[in-house]
Image (cartoon, grey):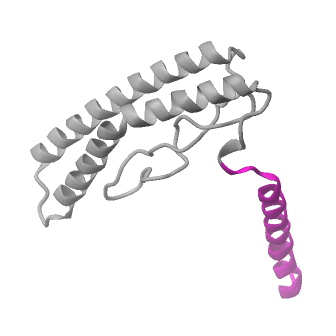
Amino acid sequence: MHRKTMAKAYVIPLMLALVLSLSTASWARPFGGGPMNLTPEQAGQLFDLKEQFMNETAGLRKAMWMKRAEMAALWKVENPDQAQIKAKQKELSALREQMQEKMVAYRLQARKICPMGGKGMGRGMGMGMGMGPGMGMGMTMAGDGPGMGPGCGF
């Protein structure tokens, strides 16, 4: 195949992908948008519920950040201690489990305010899976969490 033809075969699909991704992003709403199809009372109740959830989980989220930092420090040493890393991972897993339990309670309460059969459950401001060496999920502001999406936003 000729050199220019080969370049076009790669460049055109890449340009098309770029244009499509930019056009899609321009229509996207940050964090899934805002509350839609809600009465003012529902919007206020959901806002208050989310604020309560964030306040109640602040200490838990802080503890998770601290455990992640401790875990990162354990991995940074020249010869990581396997037992310490496993113990720290168990501590972090226990905190994640507590957070998941609180998230389930939050979502159940939100469904009482706005029962839409799961519509509107979206991604929001939450925490990802943590830090460590190698491949895997890192800290993110687009993790699973109490976000606002179409519908009730829980």
Q: Nearer the viewer, residue 146 or 128?
A: 146
Q: Main secondary structure of the magenta part?
A: helix
Residue 14 counted in the magenta span: yes
In the image, residue 88 sits, relative to residue 8, either above or below, namely above
Magenta part of the chain: 1-30
Residue sitting at 80 percent across and 73 percent down? 10
From the top left corner, tell me how far across and down residue 100 is, in percent.
Answer: 41, 27
Residue 12 counted in the magenta span: yes
- Is residue 12 among the parts visible in the rendering? yes
- Is residue 154 among the parts visible in the rendering? no
From the top left corner, tell me how far across and down residue 152 is, in percent.
Answer: 69, 27
Q: Residue furthest bottom?
A: 3
From the top left corner, tell me how far across and down residue 24 is, in percent.
Answer: 81, 55
Residue sitting at 83 percent across and 71 percent down? 15
Residue sitting at 79 percent across and 64 percent down? 22
Say whether residue 136 is left or right of residue 151.
left
